């Protein structure tokens, strides 16, 4: 992706249903596992962007993410937009054929080839502290989103498995 992108995969204690995705996501964001996964991905990449801050990644206080149905078509459009059009701090985008080649293997890799039964949601990317990159605000503690138009959070699930795709498109 043309961003700082994290894809987290989790198995929940109970199946995620259409009536409770925000509640399941909220519980995950408050769980220490979320921060452990974020820090681990950051270390594994050798970036160390999240290692030096103080405090938790999640905004202090109650977390109730704004989760909205995206649908499978919306999910694929979103991924294509990320590859072809979204702001890129790396200064490059893929053409349509190259984006198709990147996205082609994803259904097999993520869903075992079949998206039937999967639900896709967009999540307003405001549940983590902001870096202050666009606003100029001082960041207290660990932060991920920058407040730009290329920040995204996508939550998709089937049964007791869910993914959280986080993108931060700033330099």
Image (cartoon, grey):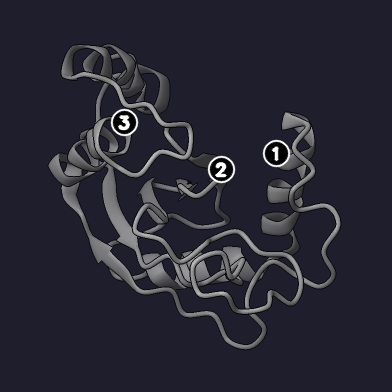
| Residue drawn 64% across the image and 71% down it | 58
The label shown at residue 83 is 3
Q: Tell me which corner region of the image, top left, top right, bottom left or bottom right, holds residue 19.
A: bottom left
The quarter of the image holding the N terminus is: top left
On screen, residue 59 versus residue 121, left or right, reads right
Give the image quarter of residue 151: bottom left
Give the label, 3 or 2, closer to the camera.
3
Left or right: 91 with respect to 86?
right
Q: CA distance from mark 1 to mark 3?
A: 21 Å
Q: Secondary structure at mark 3?
A: helix
Q: At numbered mark 1, what does the secondary structure look like: helix, strand or loop?
A: helix
Q: Report if residue 159 is visible in the image.
A: yes
**Pointer 2 local density, CA inside 10 Å: few below 14, some 14–19, many at least 20:** some
Inspect this view and state whether residue 161 appears: no
> Closer to the observer: label 1 or label 3?
3
Badge number at residue 41: 1
| Dot 2 and dot 1 residues touching (CB under 8 Å) | yes
Frontmost residue, 26 versus 147: 147
Q: CA distance from mark 3 to mark 2?
A: 19 Å
Could you tell me which secondary element the residue under label 2 belongs to? strand
């Amino acid at each position: 992706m043309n961003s700082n992108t994290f894809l987290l995969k989790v198995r929940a204690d109970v199946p995620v249903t259409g009536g409770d995705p925000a509640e399941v996501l909220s519980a995950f964001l408050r769980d220490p596992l979320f921060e452990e996964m974020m820090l681990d991905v950051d270390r594994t990449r050798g970036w160390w962007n999240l290692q030096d801050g103080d405090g938790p990644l999640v905004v202090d206080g109650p977390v109730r993410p704004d989760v909205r149905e995206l649908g499978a078509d919306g999910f694929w459009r979103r991924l294509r937009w990320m590859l072809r059009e979204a702001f890129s701090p790396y200064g490059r985008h893929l053409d349509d054929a190259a984006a198709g080649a990147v996205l082609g293997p994803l259904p097999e890799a993520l869903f075992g080839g079949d998206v039937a039964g999967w639900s896709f949601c967009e999540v307003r990317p405001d549940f983590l502290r902001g870096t202050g990159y666009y606003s100029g605000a001082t960041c207290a503690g660990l932060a991920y989103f920058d407040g730009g138009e290329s920040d995204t959070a996508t939550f998709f699930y089937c049964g007791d498995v869910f993914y959280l795709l986080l993108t931060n498109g700033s330099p």
